[in-house]
Amino acid sequence: MTRRAAEIRLDALLRTACEVIAERGLANTRTADVAEAAGVSQALVFYHFATKDRLLAQAFAYAVEQDLNRLDTVVRSTAPPLAKLRRMLRLYAPAGRSTSWSMWIDGWAESLRTPELEKLSRRLDLRWRRDLAAVIADGVADGTFDCPDPAGAAWRISAVMDGLAVQLAVHERVITRRQIAEWVRLVAARELGLEPAQLD
């Protein structure tokens, strides 16, 4: 197998592992489940990952990198701060079947027991808040936002989004995505001296 073929196969295994984890949960995912879903032998899974814990940690890292890549695209764009903020709020909000959010919630819970997962989830959480605070600070600097504490605002906005996303993912039909979007706009607008309609 060429190095390129091995990289493609590894990428496919990680994508499949993320899908299986989202469906079964971290604690209930076995290497055999990933092998079966990927249509490969369990020996090949162990060849790439050595242990189940390594497979789960690398799958979680893979999901983190996908999220970070999407975040980078927004942050590095030349859009003004208000446009970046709108995009970041849409990017972070739960969408579709909330598969990504289900995996994150599971990852946060498992991070209480698995140091490698805790490190990965912390890295994305802190990165998201840092980038959100930087966009807010840029908006304050150019007069778009009125916010004396960009870092604190980023934490408060993120905390509301996290809590609402957990409710949506765990308790089906308690709240809607539309309600979440409205409430997040309301909270972000209050934090940044905007009208909620400016975040539509």
Image (cartoon, helix red, strand yellow):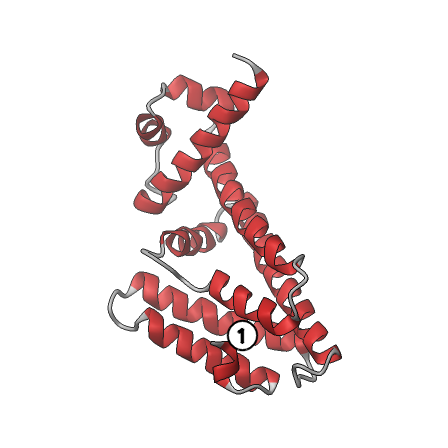
Q: Is residue 73 visible?
A: yes
Residue at the outermost right position:
141
Q: Residue at x 36, y 46 (%)?
A: 22
Between 101 and 112, the one nearer to me in the picture: 101
Q: Is residue 169 above or below residue 60?
A: below
Between 60 and 76, the one nearer to me in the picture: 76
Q: Is residue 176 above or below residue 146?
A: above
Q: Residue at x 49, y 61 (%)?
A: 91
Q: Is residue 185 above or below residue 25?
A: below
User: Residue 160: where, in percent of width, then height?
Assistant: 47, 74
| Mark 1 surroundings within 10 Å by alpha-carbon count, few (fewer than 14), some (14 through 19), many (20 or more) | many
* Residue to which mark 1 is pinned: 157
Q: Residue at x 43, y 30 (%)?
A: 13
Answer with the quarter of the image where residue 140 lies.
bottom right
Between 29 and 136, the one nearer to me in the picture: 136
Q: Is residue 142 above or below residue 171?
A: below
Amino acid type, label 1: Ile
Residue at the outermost left position:
173
User: Residue 48: where, in percent of width, then height?
Assistant: 50, 23
Answer with the quarter of the image where residue 33 lies.
top left
